[in-house]
């Protein structure tokens, strides 16, 4: 009873803190002049990390096994993974834009986990025989951490694409406007426009420089996080293969979960190949990473909707046979 109450309190506290962090980000986005809010959002994510950590530890002590046995527990662990990915650069004193991605991701996953759809999973349950193994901690934790890292990196790549194509659309629209204008201009109007262009040159150049710097930073951070996620995903798949051989007598069974995990691994292997190839631009790798964002959700969440295969205990309905 005490553990259940403590878990309930920590869940609501962490959810409330992440909601406040998102509100702070909206205020910073609308009003840049407010000083100190950015640091408050960073501290809010740290507080969220400790609350979710306490929630997981409490559930671990209560259930006496690592809380990664069903969809509810893996979503909470995914939310914890988003928060830990965010605070690592914070302790290194590196300014980044991760909080704008990790905070909404954490509140989305935790909000869905605590919704009424997964109410039955909140209660304690006996582990199915396949999960009663020391490989549970190694395999599932690596997979969920890799999902969190790959999702963050993919969202950064999506942001890079939005900024890049927004610039191209603006340039294209300006060129169309110039073609539709009349060819005949008076000499006085031409001189005035030339003066306005010279006056705004420094502003435009500084704006373009800031956009270029932002694109480079997004590309660099997405590459780093996706590289980390790819390593974790590789370790997770290999440990899962060893576990599958112990539990089911085969290293690979082409189960829907295994198949989509392999597809996810392939997509991000292509991303890393394109990203490290100097013949390709950052936009090309960002497009592949954006495709990977959808693939991850199919692998992690979409397969669970089917409730079939050897990984059916991760679906909405727990199977105890």
Image: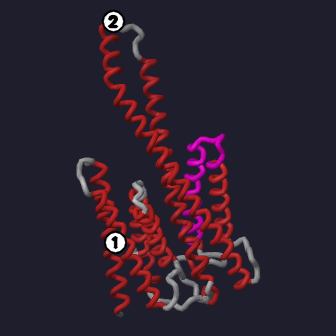
- Residue numbers of the magenta segment: 275-304
In the image, residue 64 sits, relative to residue 252, either above or below, namely: below
Determine the image quadrant of residue 50: bottom left
**Place of residue 49 in the rendered image (x, y in percent of width and height, measured from the top left):** 39, 72
252 relative to 283 in the view: left or right = right
**Callout 1: SS:** helix
Instruction: Name the spot of residue 284 as percent of width and height, x first.
Output: 60, 44
Q: CA distance from mark 1 to mark 2?
A: 63 Å
Residue at horizontal 62%, vertical 87%? 133
Quadrant of the frame with the N terminus: bottom left
Determine the residue positioned at 44% across, 91% down.
62
User: What's the magenta bit mostly, secondary-structure-wise?
Assistant: helix
Q: Quadrant of residue 204?
A: top left
Residue furthest out toward the front: 92
Q: Nearer the viewer, residue 130 or 312?
A: 130
For mark 1, what is the residue? 47
What residue is shown with label 2? 187
Picture residue at 46% right of the left edge, 23% below the top: 176
In front of the other: 293 or 270: 270
């Amino acid at each position: 009873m005490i553990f259940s109450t403590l878990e309930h309190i920590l869940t609501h506290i962490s959810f409330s803190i992440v909601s406040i962090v998102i509100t702070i980000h909206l205020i910073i986005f609308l009003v840049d002049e407010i000083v100190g809010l950015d640091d408050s959002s960073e501290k809010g994510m740290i507080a969220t990390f400790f609350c979710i950590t306490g929630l997981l530890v409490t559930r671990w002590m209560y259930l006496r096994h690592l809380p990664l046995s069903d969809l509810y527990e893996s979503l909470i662990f995914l939310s914890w993974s988003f928060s830990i990915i965010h605070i690592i650069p914070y302790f290194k004193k590196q300014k980044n834009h991760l909080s704008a991605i990790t905070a909404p991701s954490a509140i989305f996953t935790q909000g869905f986990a605590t919704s009424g759809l997964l109410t039955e999973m909140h209660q304690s349950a006996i582990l199915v025989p396949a999960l009663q193994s020391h490989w549970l901690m190694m395999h599932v934790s690596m997979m969920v951490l890799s999902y969190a890292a790959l999702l963050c990196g993919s969202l950064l790549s999506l942001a890079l694409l939005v900024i890049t194509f927004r610039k191209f659309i603006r340039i294209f629209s300006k060129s169309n406007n110039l073609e539709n204008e009349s060819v005949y201009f008076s000499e006085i109007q031409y001189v005035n426009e030339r003066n306005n262009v010279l006056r705004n040159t420094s502003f435009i150049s500084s704006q373009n420089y800031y956009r270029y710097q932002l694109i480079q930073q997004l590309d660099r951070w997405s590459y780093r996080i996706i590289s980390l996620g790819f390593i974790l995903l590789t370790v997770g798949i290999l440990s899962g293969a060893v576990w599958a051989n112990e539990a089911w007598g085969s290293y690979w069974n082409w189960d829907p979960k295994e198949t989509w995990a392999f597809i996810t691994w392939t997509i991000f292997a292509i991303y890393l190949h394109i990203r490290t190839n100097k013949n390709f631009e950052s936009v090309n790798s960002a497009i592949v990473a954006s495709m990977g964002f959808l693939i991850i959700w199919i692998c992690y969440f979409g397969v669970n909707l089917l409730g079939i295969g050897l990984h059916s205990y991760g679906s909405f309905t727990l199977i105890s046979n």
